Amino acid sequence: MDKVRVRFLPAGEVVEGDVGATILDLAREAGVSISSVCGGDGICGGCRVIIQKGEVEASPTSLLTRDEIRRGYALACQTRVRGDAEVLIPLEARSEGAQILLDDDAQRFRALLPVDEEGVSFRHHPLVSKVALKVPPPSLEDNLGDQERLLREVRRQTDGPQIQLGLKVLQGLPELLRRADWEVTATLALRGGVRELVQVEPGDRRRNFGVAVDVGTSTVVAHLVDLASSRTVDAEACYNAQASFGEEVTRRIIHAERGGLQELHDAIAGDLNRLVSALISRNAVELKDVTAVVCAGNTAMQHFVLGLDPARLRKGPYVPVTTTPPPVRAAEVGVKINPRGLLYTVPSIGGWVGGDITAGILATGLHRSEQLTMLVDIGTNGEIVLGNREWMLACSTSAGPAFEGSSVRCGVRAGQGAIERVEITSQGHVRLEVIGEGKPKGVCGSGLIDLLAELAEAGLIDRSGQLKPGSSPRVRDRDGLLEFVIVVGDRAAGGEDIVITQADIENLLRAKAAVYAGADILLSSVGLEFADVDRLLVAGGFGNYLDREKAVLLGLLPDIALERIRFVGNTAIMGAKLSLLSAEALEEAHRASRGVTYFDLISYPDYYDDFMSAKFIPHTEEGRFPSVASRLKEAV
């Protein structure tokens, strides 16, 4: 078959591929990440690129305006290359993939602070520990075998379940003990109700580290932890490289069904390896001293990490392969730590409520609390847990990736250049706060919430979210569609305007309605209301940067006393870390996950009506938001 060469700008990567391949496929081959919410089905419009040179064949689409088509825009997934070409990936279509985030970006995701000032404490009892031993050499009076002699010393210094060791360790044991003059370090890992003696090293080698990981749909966060002291040494984050196969989990599952499971597994394993490599090289830690990894993620992401088939997660009755995967040798799933190190996963609750939520329950102590608590994790999937020490209910909503900057034309993730705060003054001026205080590149989740609330309060959109023609010089018609101009681009420098379109607003209102309706239905199912909730805990990467008042004004969060609403950060990474440092914590996570009842929103008879009612600002029932109603009336 004839070949073509495509050069991707601004990176300059060049790839050779088959004539007729799509730009998106060629970008993947080149290792160039292009945002693709729908995974290449041509329905999201997120993979817009600009054809600078070359012969291409683009399928018709309604997702590009006439002006964009005139300027050379095309959808990467729907455009086939017929000859050598040069393709520019504009800022809004760039996905950083597995690139390690810069310090300023990573700091926003890595959540080094504790969840709660009260804390949730467990006994220090790492899943993998090391013990230095002086083994008495054998004699005629003490002629135990080498294995029994070693295990006798382990039991003298430690307590716990029975110990087993593998054939590989046993085969090398005689020579190692004698070469080390009977002074060795044993590494013990809890595995399936027993302790496995995973390795024996000569001398005193008690340096021992683990990695706690939040395997998020959009962002992967890793903490390097000293298992001996419980100290968090460092943290790092990257964007999930699977995004090029689809921003939403369902798109990735569909890709797996089409034969792409290995690609998805390799992508996330590659992310984990790059994060671990960055952490150990920065802190002078040897890879062989990293003996454990604990992953917390939604059920599908944990399937991808382990290479399990996720196909049945999206088909009724939505059954996972397992909600409680056993510990596995990290090397078995391509994760590079100590060759005999183990990878653990925090147990999931069900097909659509995963280990990240179990980790959140563990980290916040929701399962121990006397107070009625609601935990809302606002991410690509909006997961909600309601309950206390007596009972817990959980559900999952299809919020989509809008709050993470995807499926919004000028949406970006929370990194350098992202607009995170928006204010519209009484004179109609737009004031912005930009991460890194540089030139704005787009709007991230917290900025989008601010923007919608400000548009509503300024009277530029009505309660259904429709932009009002003529309400502001910034509201303009573009190819028959209204949009609001946030930042006017520098035309001389080739800059584009940063806007929010009518379609973007509708997308965001659907996302906020899904979260609110899910929380409301969960309460209604047990005869409660938002007024009954003692604590509303908001978790997730962008939660810490959310303006509570504006989230309430928009109708994303309920109209309750603001002091009852608390942002608790990345509870997934915190729960994973607790599990890494304490076997009791991981066991408590297992008990907590078994104690949660999964509530299926789709089967709830009034779900669609509740969802549609919540699409208004703040809601069709104004009485639910008394503090907001008066502010919006003034804007009419």
Image (cartoon, rainbow, N blue to C red):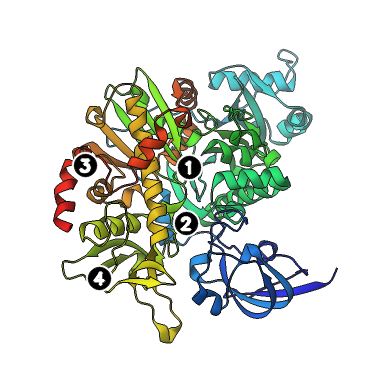
| Labelled pair 1, 4 in contact (Cβ < 8 Å) | no
**How far from the left and from the top, in percent, is residue 494?**
46, 82
Q: Quadrant of the N terminus?
A: bottom right
Q: What amino acid does circle 2 point to?
A: Ser
Residue receiving disc 4: 472
Q: In the image, 344: left or right of 384?
A: right
Residue 99, percent across and down?
A: 55, 60
Q: Alpha carbon of mark 1 to alpha carbon of mark 3: how far?
A: 48 Å
**What amino acid type should be assigned to the residue bearing mark 4?**
Ser
Q: Alpha-carbon distance for marks 2 and 4?
A: 26 Å
Expressed as whole percent of the image width and height from the top left, the position of residue 102 reads 46, 62
Query: Mark 4 and mark 2 in contact (Cβ < 8 Å)?
Result: no
Marked residue nearer the N-terminal end (1 or 3): 1
* Alpha-carbon span between mark 1 and mark 4: 52 Å
**Quarter of the view holding residue 396:** top left
Q: Position of residue 528 (x, y in %)?
A: 28, 24
Question: Going 28% across and 59% down the picture, which residue do you hit?
Answer: 461
Q: Quadrant of the C terminus?
A: bottom left
Residue designated by label 1: 225
Q: Earlier in the sequence, mark 3 or mark 4?
A: 4
Q: Few, some or many C-alpha atoms within 10 Å of disc 4 (few <14, some 14-19, many ≥20)?
A: some
**Secondary structure category for the residue under label 4:** loop
Q: Who's the residue at 43% across and 65% down the image? A: 410
Q: Residues within 10 Å of mark 3 (few under 14, many from 20)?
A: some
Give the mark nearer the N terminus: 2 vs 3: 2
Secondary structure state at the residue bearing disc 2: loop
Question: Disc 3 designates what residue?
Answer: 622
User: Where 181 falls versus 622 (above or below)?
Assistant: above
Task: Give me the C-alpha separation between circle 2 and circle 1.
Answer: 32 Å
Q: Check if mark 2's residue and mark 3's residue have beta carbons within 8 Å.
A: no
